[in-house]
Image (cartoon, coloured by chain):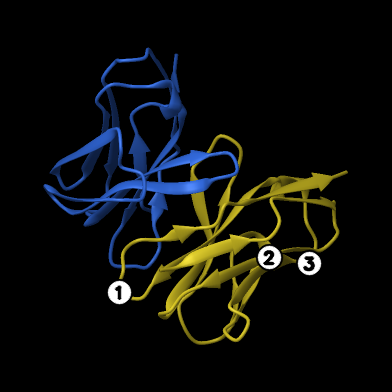
Amino acid sequence: AQSVTQLDSQVPVFEEAPVELRCNYSSSVSVYLFWYVQYPNQGLQLLLKYLSGSTLVKGINGFEAEFNKSQTSFHLRKPSVHISDTAEYFCAVSPWMDDKIIFGKGTRLHILP
Amino acid sequence: DVKVTQSSRYLVKRTGEKVFLECVQDMDHENMFWYRQDPGLGLRLIYFSYDVKMKEKGDIPEGYSVSREKKERFSLILESASTNQTSMYLCASKGGSYEQYFGPGTRLTVT
């Protein structure tokens, strides 16, 4: 079975400061990894995904994430946040050859002026 | 662009009513999913469908059923709504790529 742990339920950060949202996963099989973003009163939108190859993946809106197989982590980073980044962020894994995705419980990013 | 639409953004129903939530995707995807989202619990899979008339239970199917008569449409049914089914319901679809595409969600309140 797979599981996803997002270590912080809420992260406050000042505008223009860097941010890291942490994600660890557990799986006995190889997985694909995703970060989704949910803006207030909207559905989820894909930020980025890791399928294979380079462990550093770049996504939309200046976000990037690094896959670390030995630490089973997939942390999300942005060097400088904006007020428009206020949202909830979900880390997710999908086992190879499976159509289902397992989501973490989400991290709410608060941008402070 | 993939588009997933849900029939209502907000819905208020009474306890015991039968409730239908509709989801339509326009990309000919085989797989469709229904999740509920609650604060602090993330997204939990209710049901998914991998083809027309095919369905599989997710993690929390109790109190729900689904219908998929056409490839583009996946319906979630609450046979007798209860207050503990007050939640945000999200529909998603998935084709040959690896990610799921989500609709805007339906916020259901059962009073």
Looking at the image, is mark 3 or mark 2 earlier in the sequence? 2
Name the residue rendered at 46%, 75% in the picture: A27
Chain ID at mark 3: A
Q: Colour of chain A?
A: yellow
Locate residue B110, reporting x and y percent: 42, 18
- Element at label 3: loop
Q: Nearer the observer, disc 1 or disc 3?
A: 1
Name the residue rendered at 51%, 52% in the picture: A45
Q: Are marks 1 and 2 on the same chain?
A: yes
- Specify few, some or many for label 2: CA neighbours under 10 Å numbering under 14, 14-19, or 20 or more: some
Residue denoted by label 3:
A79
Q: Quadrant of the C terminus of chain A?
A: top right
Looking at the image, is mark 1 or mark 2 earlier in the sequence? 2
Residue denoted by label 1:
A97
Locate residue B90, reporting x and y percent: 41, 41
- Specify few, some or many for label 3: CA neighbours under 10 Å numbering under 14, 14-19, or 20 or more: few
Whether residue A108 sits left or right of residue A101 in the image: it is: right
Chain ID at mark 1: A
Q: CA distance from mark 1 to mark 2?
A: 26 Å
Q: CA distance from mark 3 to mark 2?
A: 15 Å
Q: Colour of chain B?
A: blue
- Element at label 1: loop
Name the residue rendered at 38%, 72% in the picture: A95
Q: Is residue A104 above or below residue B3?
A: below
Whether residue A65 sits left or right of residue B70 in the image: it is: right
Q: Is residue B41 above or below residue B95?
A: above
| Dot label at residue A50 | none
| Dot label at residue A22 | 2
Q: Nearer the viewer, residue B97 or B35?
A: B35
Chain ID at mark 2: A
